[in-house]
Amino acid sequence: MKRILVIAAHPDDELLGCGGTIAKLLSKGCAFKIIFIGEGSSCRFDDPSCQDAQAAIVKRNKCAKDALNSLGVSDYEFNDLPCGRLDQTPIIEINKIIERAIRSFAPDTVFTHYHGDSNNDHKIVYKSTIMATRPCGEHIIKRVMCYEVLSSSEWSFSEPFIANYFISLDEHEIEAKWRALSLYEGEMRDYPFPRSWEGVKALAVNRGTQSGNFYAEAFHLVREIHT
């Protein structure tokens, strides 16, 4: 992996899913681009167009910038499609957002959501990613992988996350992931909520024991092309 495109439905999904991997691979010289499809905040308001909802979107995007900058990521893009309403957006529009990022960034690897998540926006982003990364055209994506998102992936009880690819992490990388997540004000909560320090670390320990490591992040490898 040298050039990695991370596709996230909402700001904070990217770090919950692969924040430790970002920290690890950045230190090895890998390039990252993060694209956010939706804005992640307006669904919490009765009127998503109200002033408070718009202010919440601005605040969350600033948190995302601060969090990514803390890891050393400077290439990111906000598209601000309506949170919780991606099913009302023609999927071709989401496809084109992803396709533009692929053309401009030319990644060899794409990280995206898992098809079985309990969050419908996540499912739609997965479906759109699969369409946008079909192995045809000028640029072939060598590797498509799904990450798991705490408070979404594990709560889809009928379609549990299938981990078949692991990236080992050390304690510093787990701590870097949590420090970045902590910059998302109001999104992380106290234990036993999954998006807590204890929840993040427990998942890393569990994935580590599955893969013979102290800590790890797990992924579902959808496709890998060797040339």
Image (cartoon, rainbow, N blue to C red):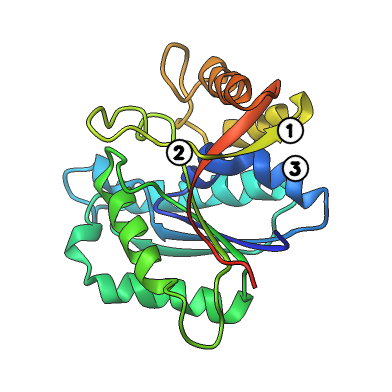
Does 215 sit above or below residue 132? above
Q: Which mark is residue 173?
A: 1
Q: Amino acid at mark 3?
A: Lys
Q: Hey, which residue is sitting farthest front in the picture?
A: 227
Query: Closer to the camera, 102 or 78?
Result: 102
Q: Hey, which residue is sitting farthest top in the picture?
A: 192
For numbered disc 3, what is the local secondary structure?
helix
Can I make out residue 70 in this image? no
Label 3, on which residue? 24
Q: Which mark is residue 148?
A: 2
Q: Position of residue 145 (x, y in %)?
A: 50, 53
Can I make out residue 221 in this image? yes
Q: Report the residue at 34% width, 70% height from top.
A: 94
Does 41 sit above or below residue 162? below
Q: Report the residue at 76% width, 51% height from top.
A: 26
Q: Amino acid at mark 2?
A: Glu
Q: Report the residue at 70% width, 20% height from top.
A: 214
Question: Looking at the image, is mark 2 or mark 3 earlier in the sequence?
Answer: 3
Q: Position of residue 102 (x, y in %)?
A: 54, 75
Question: Looking at the image, is mark 1 or mark 2 earlier in the sequence?
Answer: 2
Classify the position of the N terminus by image quarter.
bottom right
Q: Position of residue 45 (x, y in %)?
A: 23, 42
